[in-house]
Structures are given as C-alpha cells and as structure tokens.
Image (cartoon, coloured by chain):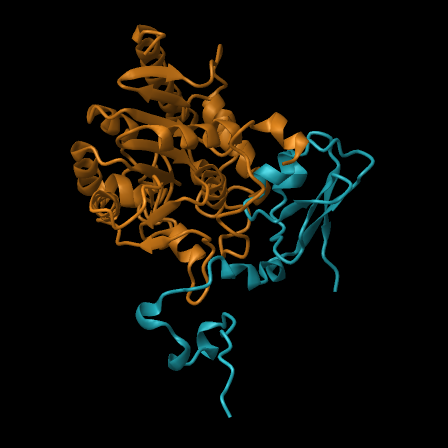
Amino acid sequence: MMETMAVHGPGIITEEEPFTPGHRACSGCGEALSVRLAAKAIGNNAIIVNATGCMEVVASPFPHTSWRIPWIHTLFENTAAVASGAEAGLRALVKKGKRPEKNVKVVALAGDGGTSDIGLQALSGALERGHDLVYICLDNEAYMNTGIQRSSATPFGASTTTSPAGRESLGQVTWKKNLPAIAVAHDIPYVATACPSYHRDLMKKVAKALEVKGPAYIHVLSVCPVGWRCATEDTIKVGRLAVRTGVFPLYEVENGQYKLSLTLTKLEPVDSYLKLQGRFRHLTEDTIKIIQERVNREYAKLVEMASKSSPSG
Amino acid sequence: MAKAKVKPKAKAEGELSWKEIEIGCFITEPGNATEFRTGAWRSRKPVVDFSKCNKCTLCYYYCPDGCIAKTPEGYFVADLFYCKGCGICAEECPKDAITMVEEEK
C-alpha cells in the first residue's frame, strides 16, 4: 500500500480498480469518477446492479465491460427490485447451505432519472422491505445519456433540452426533488449525500453504508460537463462549489439523526456556482436572488435538524 | 488436427461473429474494457514537472478514468493509452506541477 495514500484515506483505499479504465465516459465525467471511487470502497466482494443510464452505457459496450466484479444490467424501473431479489436469493442459498457464508454485498447504482422518476416505487419498496443493500443514486441532474432532458432532480432555472431557456421561459420551473429526505422518511438505518469533489468523504460513506445492516441510500452529486455546459477541467471545482454554496449540502442521517459532514460557517454566494455553468447562463439577478433565498432557507432547515439530533445518535 | 481452443480477445461489435458470442451475451472476461484505447480522443495531454510534484495523490483520486499510476520513484503520471485529456489533474494540482499541452501530430 502506498504510504502517501494512507494519509488521504486510511483503511479504505486500494490501488485496485474494480471499475477499470477504458470506459467510454465523456472526458471529465464526474459520474465516472463517483463510480470509480465508490467501486474502490466497495471492493471485490460485491454484486453491482446497474440501471440503464450513462454508467451502464459507458461501462458495458458489448463485448467490453469495465467491471471486474459481477454486474447486472437492469431497466430504469426495477433496479431496486432486482437488487432486492439478488440479496434475498443470496440469503436463501446461504440458508440452504448451497453457498458458503461470505457476506456478499449487493449495491444498486442508478442515475437521478432512474431513482427519482422511474425507479422511485421500486426503491421505496426495497427500502420498506428492509433488504440489506446499498442504493447509490448518481445524480447529474437530468437525463444526460439521452440528450439532457429534464428530470425531477433538475434544479430550478436550469436549461435543458426539454426545459429550454428562452424569451418566455427561464428553464426548469420546479425545484429539485429532495430524494434523501424521501429515503429518510422510510426510516432506514443510513442515508447520506456525497460528492466526488470530497473523495475521502464519499469513500468513507460508501464503506459505512456497506457495513450497515439493512438498506442504505447514498445520493451522489456528479458533475456532467456536457449537460451542465461547464469546462471539463472544472468538474471538481463545480462539485466543490455546489457543496460550499449550500446548493448540495453534505450530510449523513443515521437512524433519523442528522449530522452535517462539513461545517460551513458562511455559505458562499450561489452566484459563484451558477456562473461556471452554461445551463444557468440566462438567469437574471432576480432569479439568482430567488435561488439564493431558497438555498439559505433549505440549509438553515438542515442545520436546525442537525442541531436537534442528539450527538450520540 | 485438433484446434487449440483459444479464448477470443474482446473484439469490436462489428468484428465479432455469432459463433464467438456466449449464450445470453455474457461477458466472461472481467474488466476487458482495459483493451480499449480511449486516449485516441484526446486533444491535450498532461505533462508533469517532477521538481514541483509533492506526491499528494490528488490527481490520482480525481482522475475519472483512473489512468494515473504511481511510478517507481513515487510520482504520479497519466497513462496516455487511457487519458482523455480532460485537464482535471492540471486544474486541481495544488502545486501547479501539471500543465496541459496541445497534442501534436
């Protein structure tokens, strides 16, 4: 193990790449980075259930695969259902003595469309039944794979091909659906938000979610330079600004107890985050002010919930 | 004469005959995408100035392609077979040891 690497993430970092290079993700893809870092934390003893979406398309153009571990492709709507089945099947085989007890993890990967729009009922069912799986939502805030159509995870004001900005329209007119809050409402043991710009935090959260008995949900904000219309080299910077402006706060919810992963004494103005992206280029001062107010309000709510939660929880 | 059964290397979809495909289109070679040269997409390449590098590993972590590997001396350099030239490593390098250089023919 590299000594220098130990400084940057003790215990969970391997040089192995379960998600290999050679995948066809666009240059500077934040989602591929999220998957790569998550795969490092997942290790080799796991089954990946991957919904249709960018990560399915770039990782498995037949006859190639970027995965070194067992991988199943599922449809948009049944990722969580297939993952539940895999988990229940493994449990049954161990119970019947047909498989040695090896504690194989089941990890479901899906995009924001596959999670917040199409796969929501399957996810809700899996969380409610209490399957021992980890569900990772790779949120790039639109259907990027098919050409940047808006999803319910697209933020207010973003211009996409189905919510284009123009003279009469300011882009997406609804606010981003709060998926982590929906997962928390199922009263599951572990919910977290992460961003690959905070790589250690992301890997720690995935490792923690794998250890939790019962369902765990991780929402990962993944910058998409193509869909967000930002420079490829700014991927990490945009992700970091999303966190530092409070647009996408990092927190964990363990058994209903909120805990902020990063204490921000002062939020940076959302302007610095928005101006790096072409999808927000059309926004006027007034609209930015509305977004700023909303972000402040949501962040204050989160801080309040974290302060109410007991520190031991 | 018995033909030695050689496992076919992963081919592009067009070159692959139906006789070589596994039932159910299973892919039996884990991680065989490593054969695919994504470096051909690149228009800029990262060049590392080793005198500035402090081996902080940030470029290694932030590379979406996982193409940055450690040299025996402990420095980190991108494998140009995979590097797509996004420039994240150059942007995020705290010591400005990496610069993006235009590819020449």
Asked whether the viewer can see residue A176, the reply is no
A90 or A276: nearer the viewer: A90
How many numbered marks does the figure carry? 0
Q: Position of residue A308 (x, y in %)?
A: 30, 6
A227 or A8: nearer the viewer: A8
Residue A194, compared with residue A75, is above or below; it is above
Left or right of A58 on screen, residue A131: left
Left or right of B90 on screen, residue A248: left
Chain B appears what colour?
A: cyan
Q: Going 40% across and 20% down the picture, which residue do you hit? A: A292
Task: Classify residue A251 by image quadrant.
Answer: top left
Q: Position of residue A175 (x, y in %)?
A: 29, 30
Asked whether the viewer can see residue A185, the reply is yes
Q: Going 50% across and 72% down the picture, which residue do you hit? A: B11
**Chain letter for the part of the structure drawn in orange:** A
Residue B28, compared with residue A78, is above or below; it is below
Residue B71, compared with residue B43, is above or below; it is above
Q: Going 51% across and 52% down the picture, which residue do you hit? A: A26
Q: Going 39% across and 49% down the picture, which residue do you hit? A: A144
B26 or A230: nearer the viewer: B26
